[in-house]
Amino acid sequence: MSSKSLIAITGASSGIGEATARAFSAAGHPLLLMARRMDRLEALDLPDAVLKNVDVRDRAPIAEAVAEAEARFGPVGMMFANAGIARLGDIATQPPEEWDEMIDINTKGVMNSVHAVLNGMIARRSGTLMMMSSIAGRKTYPDHTVYCGTKFFVHAISESLREYLAPHDVRVIVLSPGIVETEVLDHVKDPATLANYKANKAAIGGGITADIVADLILNAYQLPQAAIVQEIVITPTRQKY
């Protein structure tokens, strides 16, 4: 069993999830990596990693994955509730099925991930919940309506959980990135919204790389348990909104 704590990550097959897996692995942590694309998880080829095909909309497999990984590596030190999807679009013409997908993955998926580790962290009086939000959880954008709603949800439950868990010495950190070089645009089907997003991204010289965000997550986690960075807000320097 590793001397370093087990790090659980949903949506670990790409983007910030993948970069975070690499950063914590390099720091010597065993991993529980969960995603829908097992081939991508296997391609990471990281040591001391339990890989699980998990859809965060399904609660039971997350709990089962946590139990299996903890039996091998000990308790989860951090759950990174990272899995999410951005179906950006004009709210008047966007198919409601895209709303359903965002709500289920970005809100229910986050809660399912938290549920799998919450009571164990309380019992141990230790642990960190890293909650994936966005600057779209702090301000609204006209073509992000439901996406913003899901990320405002993450902020609200994180603030409530932090108050609830503080007496138990469990940390809750909200991660609110701006434009990052990930696959997020792959989920945008509205042509006008996609064009506007790409134009804005190009105008500011592109997004920051996922490894920059991952290093911040690692640094925040490595603080003593009695200290917490309550929210990480990171954007490209030229991103004004």
Image (cartoon, grey):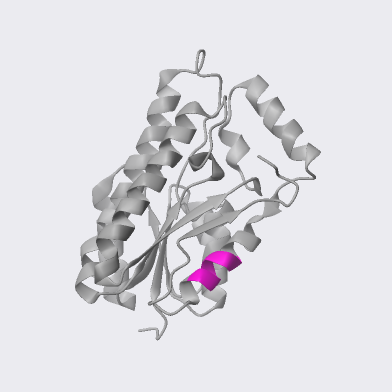
> Left or right: where does residue 212 sit relative to residue 65?
right
Above or below 112: residue 214: below
Residue 189 is covered by the magenta coloring? no
Magenta range = 215-220
Q: Nearer the viewer, residue 74 or 51?
A: 74
- Residue visible at 46% across and 76% down in the picture: 29
On-image quarter of the C terminus: top right
Q: Quadrant of residue 234?
A: bottom right
Note whether 38 is above or below 129 in the view shown.
above
The answer to whether residue 56 shows anywhere in this view is no
Q: Position of residue 107 (x, y in %)?
A: 36, 41
- Residue depicted at x 30% and y 52%: 160
Q: Is residue 186 left or right of residue 65?
A: right
Considering the image in quadrants, where does the N terminus appear?
Answer: bottom left
Give the residue displayed 41% in from the left and 19% down from the top: 96
Q: Main secondary structure of the magenta part?
A: helix
Query: Which corner quadrant of the image does residue 184 belong to?
Result: top right
Q: Is residue 141 left or right of residue 151?
A: right
In terms of depth relative to the viewer, which is nearer, 59 or 38? 59
Q: Quadrant of residue 7?
A: bottom left
Q: Position of residue 175 (x, y in %)?
A: 50, 55
Q: How many marks?
A: 0
Q: Is residue 84 above or below residue 65?
A: above
| Vertical side of 2 occupied by 67: above or below | above
Residue 137: in sight, yes or no? yes
Q: Position of residue 221 (x, y in %)?
A: 47, 71
For this view, does 119 lie left or right of residue 163?
left
Q: Position of residue 216 (x, y in %)?
A: 58, 66
